Image (tube, rainbow, N blue to C red):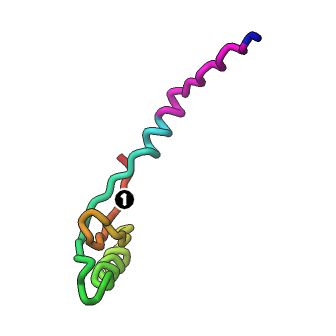
Amino acid sequence: MATAPPAPIPTLSPADLAAHAAASFVRRRILHRTPAGNPRGSRPAEVFAAARRAEGVPAETVYDYPSDDFLVVVRSAA
């Protein structure tokens, strides 16, 4: 029994490659770090992020597992 030839591998256009590269790499700039063991939890980081947002900076609070810290970050595409 004959098998069908493999389907050709699709190639991406230069525009698709550029869009993929732009969406694939997100960097973050850390503005503030609060230990997760802080008695107030993430509240100090949340307050700091809210103050930056009031200044027009798109800051957000995230939890970083490897460092066990709450981080206030600004995300930017690389």
Residue at left offset 33%, top offset 53%? 27
Q: Looking at the image, which is closer to me, 69 or 57?
A: 69
Q: Residue at x 60, y 24 (%)?
A: 10
Residue 14 lies, in percent from the top left, at: 50, 27
Q: Nearer the viewer, residue 65 or 42?
A: 65
Residue 43 x %, y %: 32, 85
Q: Is residue 59 left or right of residue 19?
A: left
Q: Position of residue 41 (x, y in %)?
A: 30, 84
Vertically, is 46 above or below 33?
Answer: below
Residue drawn 31% across the image and 66% down it? 64
- Is 7 placed left or right of 62 in the picture? right
Q: Is residue 21 above or below residue 31?
A: above
Residue at figure coordinates x 59%, y 22% from the top left = 9
What count of labels does the image hold? Answer: 1
| Residue 26 position in % (x across, y down) | 38, 51
Q: Are there few (<14), some (14-19), or many (20+) residues within 10 Å of tag 1?
A: some
11 or 14: nearer the viewer: 11
Amino acid beneath label 1 = Arg
- Residue 65 lies in quadrant: bottom left
Magenta span includes 7: yes
- Give the magenta part as a residue range: 3-17
Task: Name the side, left or right, on which 62 lies relative to 37.
Answer: right
Given the current orientation, which residue lies at the most extreme right position? Answer: 1
Looking at the magenta stretch, what is its main secondary structure? loop
Q: Residue furthest front?
A: 1
Taking the magenta stretch, the answer to whether it contains residue 43 is no
Q: Which residue is mark 1?
A: 75
Q: Quadrant of the N terminus?
A: top right
The secondary element bearing badge 1 is classed as: strand
